[in-house]
Image: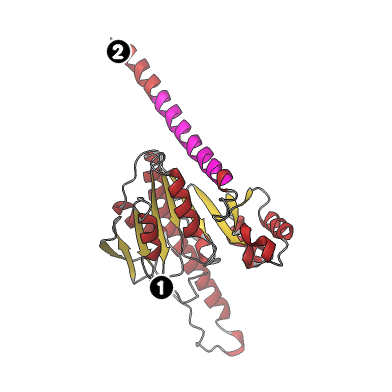
Amino acid sequence: MCVSCGCGSHDVTISGAHGEHRHHAHGHDHSHVHGDEHHHHGEGAGTDATRTVEIERGILAKNDAYAARNRARLNAGGIVALNLLAGPGAGKTTLLVETLRILGARVPAAVIEGDQQTANDAERIRATGTPAVQINTGKGCHLDAHMVGHALDELPLPPGGLLFIENVGNLVCPAAFDLGEEVRVTLLSVTEGEDKPLKYPDIFQSADLVLLTKTDLLPHLDVDIDAMERNIARINPVAPVLHVSTKTGGIGLAAWLGWLGDIRRRRLDGLAAAAESRAKSLRAAAEALP
């Protein structure tokens, strides 16, 4: 994972919800085991491997603590957070823009955008009228929970709303980092080939939903969509798979929006039930007073 891939998060910048510059934030620390240390007859190799595992565990434990804080904060407001994962060019931002346009003012929403550089995607989101914070990770290849926590400070998060976190385009490292989200959605463009789920299993294994994007291109591609779905099922047999396209009438968008509605409805129903239970307890306590 990125503990040894050479990425870093020391040049992270986070914008305000309307594009104003806010933070220089530091994500998880990266320590590296250097490959130029010479050991004779394999001496030290086991030590380096053990050290690498210890560093990875430390990084993930620290990230998980930040993620727990984010999750508690979002849960308290009844906000459904979705972590969108995909390789570059799979269509995450395009899908988000179309989704937000359809939702309009009916469902409150906010977006956190993750990219190494530029605010292009956040600007596209803001053009829909949706507040968006841009996180630029510099050389970092993924978002982490510490960055997201800073971004939450900049976003208006209305109770009962949706928070979309568009992770950095990468099929490897983002899968390892919990951001405090409720659900993970992995996008795979049909142009990427049938074997991607087998080559990059972690990002599919952790998904609650898989979206096959750009399906309007299928008539023009030599791709076996059934094989692609079988490979996804081999890695994650429980995640539903939806076909979507923002072109040609928005293929599959109704199913995607229906899935979002179900997730949000369950969250709000749970909050309402908890509030009713608490109110019942309070009334019972009041009636017991002398």
Name the residue: 40% across, 19% down.
Answer: 280
Q: Amino acid at mark 2?
A: Leu
> How was this image coloured?
secondary structure
Q: Which mark is residue 289?
A: 2
Badge 1: few (under 14), some or many (20 or more) residues near its Cα, within 10 Å? Answer: many
Q: In x, y percent, where is residue 62?
A: 41, 59
Q: Position of residue 77 (x, y in %)?
A: 37, 40
Q: Is residue 5 above or below residue 211?
A: below
Q: Is 197 placed above or below 164 here?
A: below
- Residue 267 forms part of the magenta stretch: yes
Q: Secondary structure at mark 2?
A: loop
User: Is residue 288 in sight in this rendering?
Assistant: no
Outermost residue to the top: 290
Residue 18 located left or right of residue 90: left
Relative to the observer, which residue lies in front, 68 or 79?
A: 79
Residue most extreme to the front: 248
Q: Residue 8 shows which numbered tag?
A: 1
Residue 72 lies within the magenta run: no
Which of label 1 and label 2 is nearer to you? 1
In the drawing, does residue 285 fall left or right of residue 171?
Answer: left
Label at residue 132: none
Residue ID at (52%, 77%): 48
Q: Compute the Cα span from label 1 to label 2.
A: 59 Å
**Residue 264, x across and y down, in percent:** 48, 39
